[in-house]
Every structure is written in C-alpha cells, then in structure tokens.
Amino acid sequence: MDRATIPRSLAVVRCSRYLIRDRDLAFAALHATADAMAITEVLTTPRSPWQNGVLERFIGSVRRDCLDHVIIFTAAGLQRLLKAYVDYYQRSRTHLALNKDAPISRPVSRANAGLIIAIPQVGGLHHRYECVAA
C-alpha cells in the first residue's frame, strides 16, 4: 500500500508518528498501512509486556470487566460489545489516576437532588447511577 491508495478520509486525519506493538504475527497486516501513513513501528522486546504498559492495562481491564462475563458468537457481536465497553470506560468508569473521575468528565449531582436511578451499560454488565428530579 502506498500513499496514493490511502482513502481520502484517512488522509486528513492527523495521526501519531509511532506505533508501539509487540512481535505477534497478527499485526503483520498493519505494517503496510503504517508505512503508507508514514508511521514508524517500534517493536517491543519479546516477552516484555511492561514495555507497553498502558495498552496491557487497558487489555486487562477489558478482559476482567467485560470479556470474562460474556460468550461471543460473532465478530460483529464482539465489535458491538467492545464499542459499548470503550464508551463506558471513557464516560462512566472511575479511574483512580483521575481522582475517581472518568476521562470524559460529567457534572457531579447533589446527593439530595432527587431519585437515584441505575442506567445499564455494556449490555447490563455495568451501571451508571444518576440523580433525577422526583
């Protein structure tokens, strides 16, 4: 793949200069795409998951919070579930590094603001709680 064959929609997206990945052969197809987008691939040392700790942490969270509790039947079902989990992870899941806030912050409700309701997320695996006027 060369720069001429990159779809127009991808050409305007500003992307990272580096792609940190392990040496798994599952990523072999990414090599041509990364080259075409002028992204330098940085390979981690074999058997060294600590070299990409942020991604390893996210993968562990996805596995523990989501994938260990469901049975996946199709690729489309997996994509739908992961999309819902990423939305939950960004908007609702508390992160200690963010002082128990979510990456996409939302306003804090007063405790006496009304009735507390549970909003199911990720197919009911997790819930977000909000106050609504009574």
Image: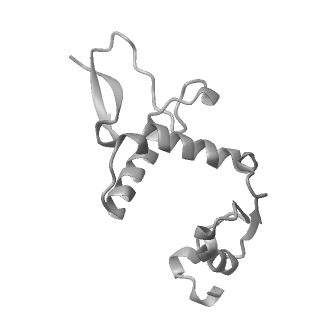
Residue 70 location, x and y as percent? Answer: 34, 44
Position of residue 86 relative to residue 127, above or below, is below
Name the foreground residue: 120 vs 114.
120
What quarter of the picture does the C terminus occupy?
Answer: top left
> From the viewer's perspective, is 47 left or right of 5?
right
Q: Is residue 90 visible?
A: no
Residue 28 location, x and y as percent? Answer: 63, 74
Query: Among all residues in the image, which is located at the extreme top?
Result: 112
Name the foreground residue: 42 vs 68.
68
At horizontal 37% and vertical 40% (from top left) the residue drawn is: 69
At horizontal 75% and vertical 50% (from top left) the residue drawn is: 48
- State which quadrant residue 109 falls in: top left
Residue 62 location, x and y as percent? Answer: 49, 44
Position of residue 130 relative to residue 103, above or below, is above
Name the foreground residue: 123 vs 12.
123
What quarter of the picture does the N terminus occupy?
Answer: bottom right
